[in-house]
Image: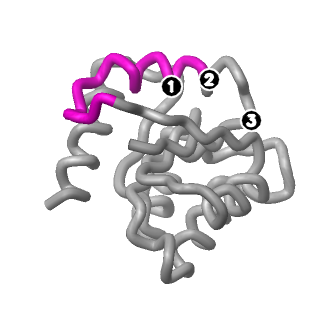
Amino acid sequence: MYFLLVEDSRNTRNLLKNYLNQIDIGHSRRDYVEADSGESALIKLRSQRVDFILLDWYLSTSMTGLEVLKEIRKDEKLKHLPIIMVTSESDKISVVEAMKHGANDFVVKPIDEKSFKEKVLKVIASSLA
């Protein structure tokens, strides 16, 4: 399974990889594509295999995670990809906004490992159904 980690913090990307490596998803191999900006994420999405996206809400570049989400959902070749938004933003308005634009789920920083793993498994299962 190929995961795209869109996060401007290398430490957070490493944490996400660590958590993902501990999840039994029935696939023996996991590959990670990393992007530290929305622009880079869109380029990588269009040029590399990706099966699942973890997308930070706040990126320290010109595109926000929400803008990246909207672009992905407009693209016929990418719109099917499961996306979990990862952010420090926990207010209901942000959650509703992300879900309205096609996020499959939402994880709040600091990331609770158990909850994160449960959400990833749930989204993977629903995307395979």
- Per the rendered image, the range of residues in magenta is 14-28
Where residue 8 sits in the image (x, y, percent)? 74, 35
- The answer to whether 77 is drawn above or below residue 62 in the figure is below
Identify which amino acid the numbered label 3 is placed on.
Asp
Q: Residue at x 52, y 56 (%)?
A: 49
Q: Secondary structure at mark 1?
A: helix
Name the image colouring. Answer: one colour
Q: Residue at x 40, y 26 (%)?
A: 20
In space, the residues marked 1 and 3 are separated at their CA atoms by 12 Å
Quadrant where the C terminus sits is bottom left
Circle 2: is it few (<14), some (14-19), or many (20+) Cα within 10 Å? some
Quadrant where the N terminus sits is top left
Q: Is residue 34 left or right of residue 27?
A: right
Where residue 61 sits in the image (x, y, percent)? 84, 49
**Which numbered disc flags the more N-terminal residue, 1 or 3?**
3
Label 3: which residue? 8
In space, the residues marked 1 and 2 are separated at their CA atoms by 6 Å
Identify which amino acid the numbered label 2 is placed on.
Thr
Q: Secondary structure at mark 3?
A: loop
Q: Residue at x 38, y 57 (%)?
A: 82
Is 34 included in the stretch rendered in magenta? no
